[in-house]
Image: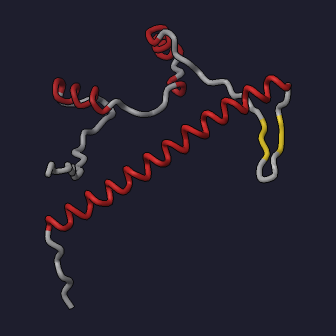
Amino acid sequence: MATKLVPIGTLIDDIWAQREAKRELEAKVKAIEDVIASQEILLMERLEKEGIDKSTGKKASVSVSENIVANIVDWDLFTSFVKKTGYFHLIQRRTSDLACRELFEKKGKIPGLEPFKKKRVNIRTLTQ
């Protein structure tokens, strides 16, 4: 039994509708995340003020933890250090797509990298 092909226009409009529904949900999630972030700030201030690092409600408990993270204040000094010591593990393994694309265009190739064409569908809302 052959399946009926959906017209391309219908498929495009369905994808658009799903994308719009996703945007609405993402906006709701963002609003919730903003409320959570504000409440976490208030909670952290309150815990610090009262000298508490653990507490419990009826449905959840909270504890304060600390982790050391890096903040680059001098990129040139840092990259110089990495190059000199070979501590490349300090850098996350990810390339800059824009910078690589530019260098591929200028030089043709970059040692250790291979260009590939990533295809995607772009959908735009039509003005009515």
Q: Is residue 10 above or below residue 115?
A: below
Q: Is residue 127 above or below residue 42?
A: below
> Which one is nearer the viewer's eye here, 69 or 79?
69
> Which one is nearer the viewer's eye here, 108 or 122?
122
Apparent side of residue 35 relative to residue 8 in the rendered image (left or right):
right
**How many numbered badges does the structure rendering display?**
0
Residue 43 screen position, x and y as percent: 72, 33
Asked which colour scheme the image uses, the reply is: secondary structure
Q: Is residue 4 above or below residue 112?
A: below
Residue 95 screen position, x and y as percent: 37, 31
Residue at 77%, 49% in the rendered image: 60
Res 8 quadrant in image: bottom left
Res 1 quadrant in image: bottom left
Residue most extreme to the bottom: 1
Residue at 55%, 41% in the rendered image: 33
Apparent side of residue 27 relative to residue 68 in the rendered image (left or right):
left
Residue 66 screen position, x and y as percent: 72, 28
Residue at 50%, 42% in the rendered image: 31
Residue most extreme to the front: 128
Residue at 50%, 47% in the rendered image: 29
Apparent side of residue 99 relative to residue 82 in the rendered image (left or right):
left
